[in-house]
Image: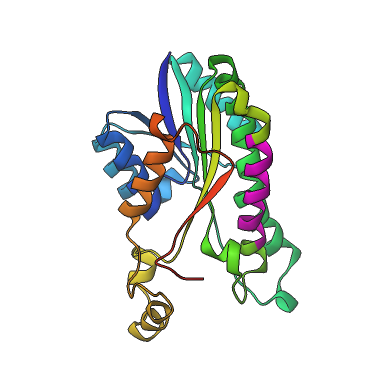
Amino acid sequence: MSNAVLVTGATGGLGYALCDAFHRKGYKVIGTTQQKNKKINQVEKLERLGISVYELDVTDFGGCEKLLERLSQSGISVGILINNAGVTDDKSFKKMTPEQWGKVINTNLTGVFNLTRVVLPQMIEREYGRIISISSINGHKGQFGQANYAASKSALYGFTKSLAFEVAKKGITVNTVSPGYLRTDMTDAMSPEILNQIIDEIPLGRLGRTEEVARLVEFLADEQSSFITGTDFRIDGGQH
């Protein structure tokens, strides 16, 4: 079986950068996105690189199992899992509904459990694997109106540290990466006033680039990082 990189949330700005970085290094890359029919341009862009994109709702455990079965039947084993899929649904806590809370927790945290849980047996059998989950600076510092999002991202640190203990002797490393504010389509659409307020809070005085985060993730997936596990890496321009 070929050893592949599986990237969730592949059609977003960071997701594309991750897929592109691993593709350039010669890896077999598999991407997932929740609604392919609403992201035709992004999907086609990835497919032009030779990257297969599958529709997947990471909150659906059965769907995650079916994807792994489908890949296995095609002779593909996942050696590197990048849990990148994530959502926000911001609201001050006193106005936040249970549905808004559940939507974010289910995608950002339970989704990580689901896919990691179904991929892990393959890694254990092969005694090799890399699990890298994308968290956020707001998992560290919090953010007004993001109690759900910050909780989901902060929880990834405990998940990562605990799982790292369990699988270390099987040649599997587990880490998180916590980006700060990145230049994406979302930030490009912000008003200059709001964007400048964000940049003013970043000591390096600029937004991060998705390619910079991708290079860090690429390093954590490499053999050179085999002594690093259970750790979070902040890439936030010095913002605390």
Image coordinates of residue 64 in percent, x first then y, are 59, 32
Residue 21 as seen in the image, left or right of residue 174: left
**Image location (x, y in percent) of residue 115:** 59, 35
Q: Quadrant of the N terminus?
A: top left
Q: In which image quadrant can residue 22 be found?
A: top left
Location of residue 184 with respect to 144 vertically, above or below: above
- Which residue is located at x 75 percent, y 78 percent? 94
Q: Position of residue 181 (x, y in %)?
A: 42, 66
Pick whichever, 22 or 74, lies toward us: 22
Q: Relative to the observer, which residue lies in front, 180 or 52?
A: 180
Q: Which residues are magenta?
A: 151-164
**Left or right, residue 41 beside residue 137:** left
The picture quadrant where one finds residue 222 is: top left
**Res 59 seen here:** no
Q: Is residue 62 visible?
A: yes
Q: Is residue 195 magenta?
A: no
